[in-house]
Structure formats: structure tokens, C-alpha cells
Amino acid sequence: MKKILITGGAGFIGSHTVRHFVTNYPEYTIYNLDALTYAGNLENIKDIEGKPNYKFIKGDITDADFIIGLFNEYKFDGVIHLAAESHVDRSISAPNVFVKTNVMGTVNLLNAFRVLWQDKWRDKRFYHISTDEVYGSLGLSGLFTEESLYNPNSPYSASKAASDHFVRAYGETYGLPYVLTNCSNNYGPNHFPEKLIPLFINNIINMQPLPVYGDGKYTRDWLFVLDHARAIDVVFHTGVNHQTYNIGGFNEWQNIDLVKLLCAIMDEKLGRSKGTSEKLITYVKDRPGHDLRYAIDAGKINNELGWKPSVTFEEGLALTVDWFLANQEWLNNVTSGAYMQYYKKQYLTP
Ligand code: NAD
């Protein structure tokens, strides 16, 4: 039986990834390591609690001694590393924790994996999950490929870029068998409502303003989170060591067009008259260092590993809205308390 450590499995993408592996690979034992920060929520994976091939471990990847002890105790054959501080706006107001978690946390995991398996790498794999934001901003045309130069512009993307470099450096220096993916923006069930799509779904339900940065022309490439979890499976099992794969759905949207599409879907689902939600759109002061456009060329993973998204954006967005409408208790629990204070400070102060 293989022992797989998944970090950050109580977060958004991590919870879908953990569920995917626990469900599809009963021959593996999946260890979910998460510090349960504001973004981690065991509610996201309560349906798999008690499964015989699943174990949750509360712990912090920035604690080097704890991580070494954990690897010695469980002898993980594979690591799928998602734990991170993930929100760009938070990285602008408080960058240090991004360096600590995203850079030092990753290096702690690399060190523990290296010490455990040095020179016995056969059938071992370290999979690092990263973002397309490491490439910086595109102009109006072109796509990020695996050869694009790193040019991060926010403390978040700089910390992820640094962690990617460490993973590659451990591959070159110590022969550590890694794979690395850079994925576009995810959306879907359990998305923390500080991020654009769930924030706007919540605000539309409550008839609150929809804060759109700048002129709304910022462009992002969106992928349904379950398709990301499937891609992680494919890369973990069939990706080539020391290779990077970009993951995306060839699905670019300007923020303002996305918001209008979401408003139309929500008006219909909530039985409101056409145009009701669009009236909530409010343009707010731009984020500093805001990247104009991200767009992924996913040709390598499509052609070499045979992965493609399974849903269109319209289908995925409708599934997402349905999930949030059916899980308003989850949403209310997440938006009460600390997150609400952060949200008010971030978007609603003059
Ligand atoms: P998230 O913020 O929803 O979840 C992060 C998880 O990591 C949380 O459960 C949190 O408790 C945990 N965590 C944070 N610090 C920790 C620490 N010190 N020790 C242990 N656990 C800790 O993030 P997400 O959106 O699910 O992103 C997961 C990964 O995917 C990140 O590495 C992110 O950079 C990457 N990524 C995200 C997107 C996206 O659109 N969300 C796109 C591409 C790549």
C-alpha cells in the first residue's frame, strides 16, 4: 500500500483533491496534513471522515522538526503539496506569512522527503502545486507556456515562484523526483468567499454591492476545481519526473463579463427579474501591482498526458451556483466572524 501525504487538504482545491484520491484509490492511504488556518475547514471533507484509507493530521508545515518527525513516522512514498497562503490581497497587506508558509514550508517538506529517501528514489514522487501567477502579466495577446519566464508581481506570486525554484533546485541538486504544475484560477464548491466568484455569489444572494476592481477589464483563465483535481491525479501518476505542466481550460474571461454572466445565472436561479443583480456592480479602487491578463497554454498536458477539462465554464459555473445555494449554512458559517471583519476592511472602508 502506498502512503500519500496531501498538504492543505482542508482548503479549497486540497479538499477536492483529497476526496478524489480517497475515493478513487482505496489501495493508497491518504494523509491530509493541514494547519487549519482561516482558509482550512474540516467541513469541506466531512463526508470522507472515517474512511479506512484516510487520516487527518493537524500540523504546520513551517515547523521543521514536526515535519521531519512526521516523515520519519509515516514514511510517505508520495507528497502532493497544496498547503499555502493563497490570497493575493492578503499578501499585499501582510507578506511575511506568505514567505514563511509558501517558501519555508515548502523547503521543510523538501528537506524531510530528501532525508527520508535520499538515493532510494525509485517509485517516490514529490508533486508541487503552483499557479500561473508566477509568470506575471500578459499583454492583450499570447499565452503562458512552460517556457515562459518567471516574472511575479505580487508578494503571493513571488512566494509561489520562490517555492517553485526550490523544488526545481532540489531536483537538480539532489536528484529529488518532482513534478510541478502551474494552474489557472480555480472555481467551484467550497471556494472561500474572499475570492471573486464565491464572494459575488454570496453578495448577490444578500443583495450586497459587487466590488469590481478598476475598469473590470482584468482577464483570468478559469478552471473548474474538480477538473483540477483530475489533472493532479493524471500528473501524479503519469507525469514525467523533473517536468512542469501548465493546467488550464483555454477559458479566458474579462472580470466584468464573468460578473455579468454570473449575475444572469443568479437572477434566473433566484427567480429575480433580469438585470436585478447587475445593478449591484460597483467599481472599486484598483489593487496595486494588478496583473492585466493571465492565460494558459495547456497544450502540453492535453497532448502528452491526455487530460482535458470535463465541463464548460457555463456548466461549471451553474454547478457552483447550485452548490452555494444548497449550502448556505456553510457559507454563513464561513462569512461570520473573522472573515467578515477582513472583508469590511478590504472592500467596504472608504
Ligand atoms: P486555500 O487557501 O483554500 O487552502 C490552503 C490550505 O492550506 C488551507 O486549508 C490552510 O489551512 C492550509 N495551510 C495554510 N498554511 C498552512 C501551514 N503553515 N501548514 C499546513 N497547512 C497550511 O488555497 P487553495 O485555493 O485551495 O490553493 C491550494 C494550492 O493551489 C496553493 O498552493 C495555491 O497556490 C495553488 N493554486 C491555487 C489556485 C486557485 O485558483 N485557488 C490556482 C492555482 C494554484
Image (cartoon, rainbow, N blue to C red):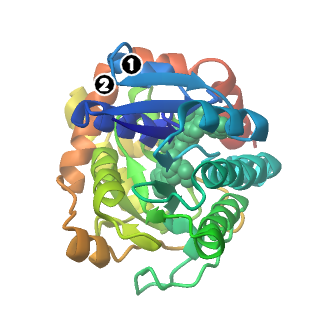
Q: Position of residue 310 (x, y in %)?
A: 17, 54
149 lies above or below 29:
below
Compared with 327, 171 (above or below) is below
From this view, report whether residue 261 is shown above or below residue 252.
above
Residue ranking furthest to the front: 119
Given residues 123 and 344, the one toward you in this image is: 123
Q: Quadrant of residue 135?
A: bottom right
Residue type, label 1: Gln
- How would you rate the neighbour count of disc 1 (Cα within 10 Å): few for under 14, some for 14-19, many for 20 or more? few
Query: Could you tell me which residue is drawn at 78 percent across and 45 percent down?
Result: 97
Q: Is residue 189 shown left or right of residue 125?
A: left
Please give the residue where the numbered disc 2 appears in the rendered image.
325
For this view, does 72 lie left or right of residue 251?
right
- Residue holding disc 1: 328
**Mark 2 crowdedness (10 Å alpha carbons): few <14, some 14-19, many ≥20:** some
| Residue type at tag 2 | Leu
Instruction: Please say whether residue 194 is visible from this viewpoint.
Output: no
Q: Position of residue 114 (x, y in %)?
A: 63, 55
Q: Residue at 82%, 50% (x, y): give it.
A: 96
Label 2, secondary structure: give it: helix
Q: Is residue 292 left or right of residue 95?
A: left
